[in-house]
Amino acid sequence: MRILLAEDDRIIADGLIRALKSSYAVDHVDNGADADTALLAQQYDLLILDLGLPRLPGLEVLTRLRARKKAIPVLMLT
């Protein structure tokens, strides 16, 4: 399972990455624009998405993802 973590808070991101890496492949980005780009370039099984991302808000990332008809599960963080 491949997970994209889109989180700009370094402490939260580090904790989630440490917890998930033992069982899953985790890619991390710290802004919405990079999350959108990663979702275009790679197939993910899950997106963990912060709502308050810089450069592109989390809800816009989700809107773009769904507009591309991608049905991957999304866990929203706030």
Image (cartoon, rainbow, N blue to C red):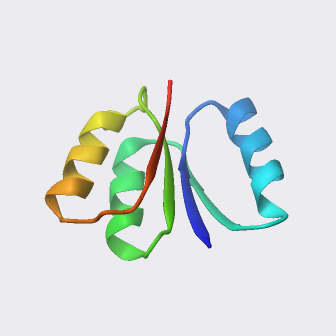
Quarter location, residue 15: top right
> Going by the image, does 66 lie left or right of 22?
left
- Residue at image point 51% right, 60% down: 46
> Going by the image, does 26 lie left or right of 56?
right
- Residue at the left extreme, as displayed: 67
> Going by the image, does 64 lie left or right of 46?
left
Q: How many marks?
A: 0
Q: Relative to 57, does residue 38 appear above or below in the rendering?
A: below
Q: Relative to 25, does residue 65 appear above or below in the rendering?
A: above
- Residue at image point 22% right, 55% down: 66
**Could you tell me if residue 55 is visible in this image?**
no
The answer to which of 57 and 76 lies nearer the viewer is 76
The image position of residue 45, as x and y in percent, is: 50, 68
Q: Relative to 15, does residue 42 appear above or below in the rendering?
A: below
The answer to which of 27 and 43 lies nearer the viewer is 43
Q: Relative to 70, does residue 52 appear above or below in the rendering?
A: above
Quarter location, residue 53: top left
- Residue at image point 50% right, 23% down: 78
The N terminus is located in which quarter? bottom right
> Going by the image, does 30 lie left or right of 62?
right
Quarter location, residue 41: bottom left
**Could you tell me if residue 62 is visible in this image?**
yes
